[in-house]
Amino acid sequence: MVLKGLNKYLLILITLLFLSNIDLLGSNAGKILKVLKKELNCSEIVLSDFLEDEIVNEPKCHVYQVALNGEVIGYAINAVGFGRYDEYEFLVYTDLLKRIEFVRVINYYSDYGGEISSKKWLDQFSGYEGGHIKYGEDIQAISGATISGNSMVNRITEIISMLKESDI
């Protein structure tokens, strides 16, 4: 009798997860693909998963190869930044030389610091290919988004460094 009740609750839980569009694998592949297609103005983009431990040693960063017509054209990195109260997820797209083409915020959960989602602010990272950058000097500071903005700068520096050190 207890097993029958557990099966019922398990079925309800799985249904709720499916209906709420929660990604059990922790990636945002669908959202990333949508952003890439829009930004690159191309509907034939394909994402290929890398094994995370080949490139990164952290669970909150996922690297994809981006291909067009079977040819790799760049890399998409889904990463997590930290705001004052909540984490946020963002996408870094690089060319094959691991130089940033664009950065976009995928999910911003907090009520504070969301100004970092501005395309104009994020475009400051275009062309970055590694080295030291400082929030408030190299990257314009944003009033009300100091923690989120500083986190974004630090995470992007780490991501590009990680990519440059990898064998991809």
Image (cartoon, rainbow, N blue to C red):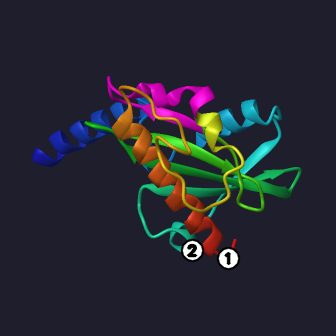
Asked if residue 13 lies left or right of residue 141, the reply is left
Q: Earlier in the sequence, mark 2 or mark 1?
A: 2
CB within 8 Å, label 2 to label 1: yes
Binning the other alpha carbons within 10 Å of mark 2 as few (below 14), some (14 to 19) or many (20 upward) gives few
Q: 26 and 130: which one is in front?
A: 130
> Residue sitting at 68 percent across and 58 percent down?
129
* Magenta region: 104-121
In the rendered view, tell whether residue 163 sits above or below residue 95: below
Q: Amino acid at mark 2?
A: Glu
Element at badge 1? loop
Mark whose residue sits in front, 2 or 1: 1
Q: Quadrant of the N terminus?
A: top left
Q: 52 and 136: which one is in front?
A: 136
Q: 3 and 35: which one is in front?
A: 35
Residue 24 in the image: state x and y as whole percent.
Answer: 41, 47
Residue 139 in the image: state x and y as whole percent.
Answer: 54, 41
Q: Amino acid at mark 1?
A: Asp
Element at badge 2? helix
Asked if residue 15 lies left or right of residue 29, the reply is left
Q: 7 and 64: which one is in front?
A: 64
> Residue sitting at 59 percent across and 58 percent down?
63
Residue 112 is one of the magenta-drawn residues: yes
Binning the other alpha carbons within 10 Å of mark 1 as few (below 14), some (14 to 19) or many (20 upward) gives few
Find the distance from the CA under tag 2 to the CA under tag 1.
9 Å
Quarter residue 104 falls in: top right
> Residue sitting at 62 percent across and 66 percent down?
163
Residue tagged 1: 167
- Looking at the image, the residue that sits furthest to the front is 137
Q: Quadrant of the C terminus?
A: bottom right
> Residue sitting at 53 percent across and 57 percent down?
157
Q: Which mark is residue 54?
A: 2
Residue 111 in the image: state x and y as whole percent.
Answer: 32, 23
